[in-house]
Amino acid sequence: MLLGGLALAQLAAPLPLRGQTGGVSTRAAVVVGVNKTGDLPVLRAAASGAKSVASWLSAEGFEVKFFGDDDGRVVTADGIKRAVTELVNRGTLTQLVIYFSGHGVAFGTTEFWLLSGAPDDLAEAVSVTECIDQANRSAIPNVVIICDACRSIPDFDTTLLHGTVLFPRGSFVPGVQSPDVDRFFGTRQGAPAYEVKIATDNYAGIYTSTLLDAFKSPHAGMVTRVKDVDVISNRALKAFLLEEVPARLKAANSKVIQYPDSKIESPETAYIGRVAVQPTPTPTVTPGPTTGNITVSDIANHQFSLTRVGPLASLRDLDFKALDRASAASELSRVQREFLDTKKADSFDTETGFFVVGASVRAVWIAGDQGGDIADAGDGRERPAMIKIPGTYRQPVTTALIFEDGSGTVVAALPGFIGSLTVRGGQVTSVAYAPSPQSSRRDEYAGENARLEELRALAAASAKLGVFRIEGDKEARTDAGRRLANQIRVLKSVDPTLGIYAAYAYADANLPDQVSSVQSYMRGDLGADLFDVALLADRLTGQRIEELRNSVVPFCPMLTQGWQLLRVREVSLAENVQRARDSLRPGLWTTFGPPGMEFIGRAIQATK
């Protein structure tokens, strides 16, 4: 086995390949394969796999633009962006496929594909998170993103890596443009992808080779007939990959395992390719529940199905006992327990403040004339820090907390709420709000506390692991979004973080109306916009945050993933806040290293 940053494809050059359509195709693809990236280990199968994908797509009628380094060429971000931009701007495409194989990196919810000049050249990478956001805002009915690459934290520093956005901004019309964006990732978030040696000096990316085989050797029941053509739908492809990739690794007596991660928004009739060979007929057997390949997404969806929210995606037919066993031993359940076991400020005698577990607090900065009162700095272990916000602040306000080592975070101080923060390993891992004992919301909180704690822990753990997502066709996503909204509508009043989590899930599922609903409700309830929710609702587009300091708090995203959307949403932060970004630490909630907090301090001073 050769561990690759992206395992599979090969691309030869920016060379267009015409499909056999007899005319201009409304289906196009940009295929990229990079074996050599900077001083990182050279991959064996990225370029060759990509070349195979390009040939296959061309035969399927796609107009293919192909970029690869197998002949020594340099693959650049500018070249790929020009190709994608030209295709999108035509306004005639019905489907666009973007395939990448090479080295990939991820930290938190931020992901990059590394091109020839990376990581030394910070622009020579593709910002995956931003590309998905822009694909959601394009006018192409179906965008398919296929990635055969690692999604794990690299050995080198990625804090300065911002990458390139492939999609043009264009003009987004909410409610009118509603693309289905399907994502096929070769491995789950935080995990590597692999190349396997199949013969002497012959390597293949396990994910790409399996993907191509889905159309050559489909399983019984996978074939769908669309307009008199037998095809493998994107939905069927998702199921095939999840079953076959780990099975093939096991069959090869591999010591590693790899579980693909797919998210499908398109209907059953959406597909990339036709069936090359009909599956061998087999006797009709009613399948029973399966026990294998239970993923974190399955566990999260199962857990949501047991709440009043219900499942956020279709439930797979999994053996219930096996699912329970997998759930009990899962990373998701472990993170949930951490959130549920965190100490809360049940008897904090202040109307507005913060309760910090896991770190001592040496300073509190507030955007205004006064600083916070550190009632107890805590010791970071047995004694949590307790911060009082002066009662003169009657509206939400930007607040910075500086920990003993000089790192820190920026959060919103909300009148009538106590914010509980948990710090582990130098990162803020959890933020939760609860009405203070003096708040009129306290009785409502007491009545909903148990349900709130469980739903918040599930949402937070799912968001941390990248599986808090609404999936299915537009009708299914809208229905799941409505159920989620109904259950958290009241709970947002007693913990606004649920509204933040929901807004990100809605934005990821391309449900702009639901995002706007959350934003409108929370603004009316809190008297100001929370930055993340306003960002996702497009209320900050084209604006300078310094000019909105009394109506939008804090002055930057509270969740780390929000930083990755500022550029594509055209939001301008204050210069010092923007400079602090280079000190962001990976994690769910925004945490800056000491250099970043110095810039935050200057930004706070500028607001006085």
Image (cartoon, rainbow, N blue to C red):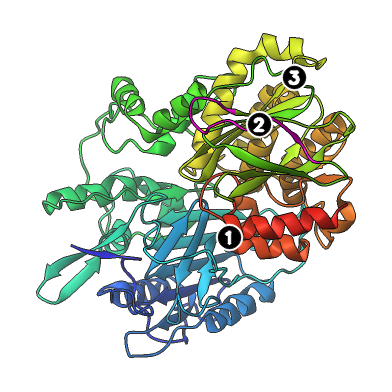
Is residue 488 or residue 286 the one in the foreground?
488
Who's the residue at 54% across and 37% down the image?
359
Asked whether 373 falls inside the magenta stretch, the response is yes
Is residue 315 or residue 196 the one in the foreground?
196
Is residue 521 or residue 456 the one in the foreground?
456
Picture coordinates of residue 400 (x, y %)? 71, 45
Q: Is residue 518 above or below residue 607?
A: above
Asked whether 302 falls inside the magenta stretch, the response is no
Q: CA distance from mark 3 to mark 2?
A: 17 Å
Q: Is residue 209 above or below residue 427?
A: below
Q: Main secondary structure of the magenta part?
A: loop
Of helix, strand and loop, which one carries label 3? loop
Instruction: Residue 223: give its label.
Output: none
Who's the residue at 40% across and 66% down the image?
156
Q: Quadrant of residue 487?
A: top right
Who's the residue at 78% across and 32% down the image?
389
Over which residues does the magenta segment extend? Answer: 371-384
Q: CA distance from mark 1 to mark 3?
A: 33 Å
**Of the image marks 2 and 1, the number of the one nearer the N terminus:** 2
> How many C-alpha atoms fall within 10 Å of the one at disc 2: few (<14), some, or many (≥20)?
many
Q: Amino acid at mark 3?
A: Ser
